[in-house]
């Protein structure tokens, strides 16, 4: 099940993803939502592993919103990716739980963790940081050769 529509018109399995709604995961500017069962299953597993709330600061983005926030031209957010706010979660347990939940790629931000299920390949790194501040805050949780994407 993969499709894009306004959040109010998407097919949503509330039994499968009981801790989230399409509205909270949709584009902040227009309500567009992309449903990707694999990504949503990983998000639900993350919520269960953490045994508490998971705040998604950014989920799906329409092309216009992605450009406005400075997202990459081919950002996975144009489909479905999640920027998980740290909130009460410590960095190491959150990253470990996200890996265990089935996410494949991780962006280490100052106050959030980008997670997605896009395959790692020559154009999509498995792990990256967003500048020196995020690199410092996540120090010790990634290999020294991890790329930096300053935004």
Image (cartoon, helix red, strand yellow):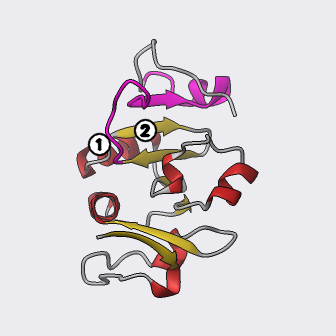
Point out residue 58 in the picture as x, y percentages from the top left corner: 57, 59
Residue 120 vs residue 84, the one in the foreground: 120
In magenta segment, residue 76: no
Count the numbered circles shown. 2
The quadrant holding residue 110 is top right
Q: Residue at x 38, y 31 (%)?
A: 126
Please give the range of residues in magenta.
117-140
Quarter in which the N terminus is drawn: bottom left
Residue 64 vs residue 87, the one in the foreground: 64
Residue 105 vs residue 124, the one in the foreground: 124
Point out residue 22 in the picture as x, y percentages from the top left corner: 47, 77
Q: Determine the secondary structure under disc 2.
A: strand
Residue 102 vs residue 142, the one in the foreground: 102
Left or right of residue 106, residue 132 in this image: right
Q: Residue at x 51, y 80 (%)?
A: 7
Point out residue 122 in the picture as x, y percentages from the top left corner: 38, 24
Q: Residue at x 42, y 81 (%)?
A: 10
């Amino acid at each position: 099940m993969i499709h894009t529509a306004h959040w109010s018109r998407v097919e949503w399995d509330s039994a499968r993803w009981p801790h989230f709604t399409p509205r909270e995961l949709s584009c902040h500017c227009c309500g567009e939502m992309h449903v990707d069962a694999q990504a949503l299953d990983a998000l639900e597993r993350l919520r269960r592993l953490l045994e508490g709330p998971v705040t998604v600061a950014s989920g799906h983005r329409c092309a216009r919103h992605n450009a406005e926030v400075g997202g990459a031209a081919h950002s996975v957010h144009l489909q479905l990716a999640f920027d998980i706010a740290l909130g009460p979660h410590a960095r190491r347990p959150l990253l470990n739980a996200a890996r265990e939940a089935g996410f494949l790629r991780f962006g280490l931000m100052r106050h959030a963790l980008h997670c997605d299920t896009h395959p790692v390949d020559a154009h999509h790194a498995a792990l990256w940081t967003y500048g020196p501040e995020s690199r410092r805050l996540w120090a010790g949780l990634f290999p020294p050769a991890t790329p930096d994407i300053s935004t």
